[in-house]
């Protein structure tokens, strides 16, 4: 099974402009993320796909592999799909560009679900972690997911799902962690599917897969990535590096 990692990297960020090019212990955030993905040893290859010549040159000049986006894309999945069309690969793992402290264990978990999936019932796999605090559950920035008895996603939402009409029902609330492993054919199919009402409403691209009948296998983890979304996050990351 040929598995690669693709890191979608946009230069502009509304919350933290140019965050991927910020210095982190003598290297940029995106270079540290690229190297961390390589060092997991899980992938036959690692690529950064970007719409920025600055990020492209940064990766190439440091001995890495980068692909320039040809089109403008609304989602990371679209950008990755364009990049891997001509690559010989079975599974594509989406690694977030702002997570330089990649943990190998959760990545290995999402890849492993495909190893015994001989009937190809799984189109993509992703991660979820239990959340308990009321504030976390009600925070619309935390995307919640509910699954069936086999661990396949039923729905994702920024709202509280399921609604706690009976607080004693023993429901566990699961937060979606945005790491994906795709079958190449599912990713390419996504690229040609139109955005429908659920995705447009919630602004969650994973709903496009569900709306068109794709099956998303969710894997529980206790590891939550350390992303760099703010200047404060960057300062914390610098202290960790030092």
Image: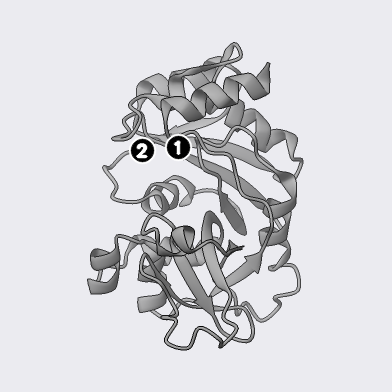
Image-based side of 7 in relation to 3, left or right: left
Q: Identify the image quadrant of residue 114.
A: bottom right
Mark found first going from the N terminus, 1 or 2: 1
Secondary structure at numbered mark 2:
loop
The answer to whether 228 is drawn above or below residue 182 in the figure is above
Q: Residue at x 46, y 52 (%)?
A: 85
Q: Residue at x 28, y 72 (%)?
A: 198
- Mark 2 packing: few (<14 Cα in 10 Å), some, or many (20+)? many
Q: Identify the image quadrant of residue 157.
A: bottom left
Q: Residue at x 37, y 64 (%)?
A: 158
**Label 2 belongs to which residue?**
69
Spatial separation of the CA atoms under disc 1 and disc 2? 6 Å
Contact between labelled residues 2 and 1, with CB atoms less than 8 Å apart: yes
**Label 1 belongs to which residue?**
49
Task: Return the x and y of residue 242 as percentages of the image width and height.
Answer: 68, 16
- Mark 1 packing: few (<14 Cα in 10 Å), some, or many (20+)? many
What scheme was used to colour the molecule?
A: one colour
Give the camera-side residue of 44 and 124. Answer: 124
For the N terminus, give its image quadrant: bottom right
Task: Return the x and y of residue 164 as percentages of the image width and height.
Answer: 44, 81
Please tell me the numbered disc located at residue 173.
none
Task: Return the x and y of residue 153 as percentages of the image width and height.
Answer: 51, 76
């Amino acid at each position: 099974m040929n598995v690669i990692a693709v890191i979608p990297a946009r230069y502009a960020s509304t919350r933290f402009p140019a965050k991927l090019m910020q210095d982190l212990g003598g290297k940029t955030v995106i270079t540290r993320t690229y190297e961390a993905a390589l060092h997991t040893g899980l992938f036959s290859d690692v690529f950064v796909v970007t719409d920025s010549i600055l990020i492209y040159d940064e990766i190439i000049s440091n001995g890495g592999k980068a692909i320039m986006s040809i089109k403008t894309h609304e989602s990371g999945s679209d950008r990755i799909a364009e990049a891997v069309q001509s690559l010989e690969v079975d599974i594509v793992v989406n690694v977030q560009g702002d997570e330089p402290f990649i943990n190998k264990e959760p990545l290995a978990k999402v890849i492993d679900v495909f190893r015994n999936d001989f009937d190809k019932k799984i189109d993509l796999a992703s991660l979820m972690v239990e959340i308990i605090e009321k504030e976390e559950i009600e925070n619309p920035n935390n995307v919640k997911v509910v699954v069936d008895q086999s661990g396949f996603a039923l729905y994702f939402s920024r709202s509280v799902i399921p609604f706690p009409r009976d607080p004693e029902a023993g429901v566990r609330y699961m937060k979606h962690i945005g790491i994906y492993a795709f079958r190449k054919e599912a990713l390419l199919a996504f690229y040609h599917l139109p955005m429908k009402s659920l995705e447009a409403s919630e602004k969650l691209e994973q709903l496009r897969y569900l709306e068109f009948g794709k099956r998303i296998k969710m894997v529980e983890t206790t590891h939550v990535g350390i992303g760099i979304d703010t200047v404060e996050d960057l300062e914390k990351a610098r202290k960790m590096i030092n």
